[in-house]
Image (tube, helix red, strand yellow):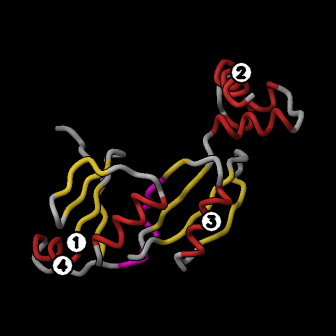
Amino acid sequence: MKFICPLIVVDDIKKSRHLYENILGQTVKKDFGENVIFAGDFAIHQRDHFQALIGNREIIKKSNSFELYFEHDELPEIVGKIKALDLELVHDIVAQPWQQLVVRFYDYDKNLIEVGERLEHVAFRLFRNNYSMDKICQITHLSKEAVENAIKEYS
């Protein structure tokens, strides 16, 4: 058996497609009308069509039991776009225990979305703040080689 992709249900596929394509930078891989698959290997599906496929069972919004995760190093830019669309923030930019900066928000259909900076960016940021190599590895759980590569990448 092969896992293909997660699928989230949306009320307005055109509006949601705009969010994922134009705000979160995703590329459409396949467009089946009521079902759109993105190159990042997740899909959005029109609510009424999907609900019919599952015998009209209830679809519960804002369950917080699942999130889609994206990476982008310029979080203030993303937060500005999210606020301009009047989407609900779960929280503004916060540091996770491993020092990765992230923001979480709900899409138009109350699906939980997280955008976090790349761990390589975290390593570089810690390096810029004079953390030792050992401390960066300890905090981020990245190998010394990965941290060294991240420093080179961002320098």
Mark 4 = which residue?
A: 48
Q: Real-space Cα distance between discs 2 and 3?
A: 29 Å
Q: Residue at x 44, y 57 (%)?
A: 68
Amino acid at pointer 4: Asp
Of callouts 4 and 2, which one flags the residue occurring earlier in the amino acid sequence? 4
Mark 2 = which residue?
A: 148
Amino acid at pointer 2: Glu
Find numbered disc 3 in the image and state the secondary structure of the residue it sits on.
helix
Which quadrant does the N terminus fall into? top left
- Mark 4 and 2 residues: CB-CB less than 8 Å, in contact? no
Which quadrant does the C terminus fall into? top right
Up-down: is 8 above or below 2? below
**Which class describes the residues within 10 Å of circle 2: few (<14), some (14-19), or many (20+)?**
some
Up-down: is 13 above or below 153? below
- Mark 4 and 1 residues: CB-CB less than 8 Å, in contact? yes
In percent of width and height, residue 42 lies at 32, 52
Q: Picture quarter containing residue 84?
A: bottom right
Mark sitting on residue 124: none
Mark 1 = which residue?
A: 46
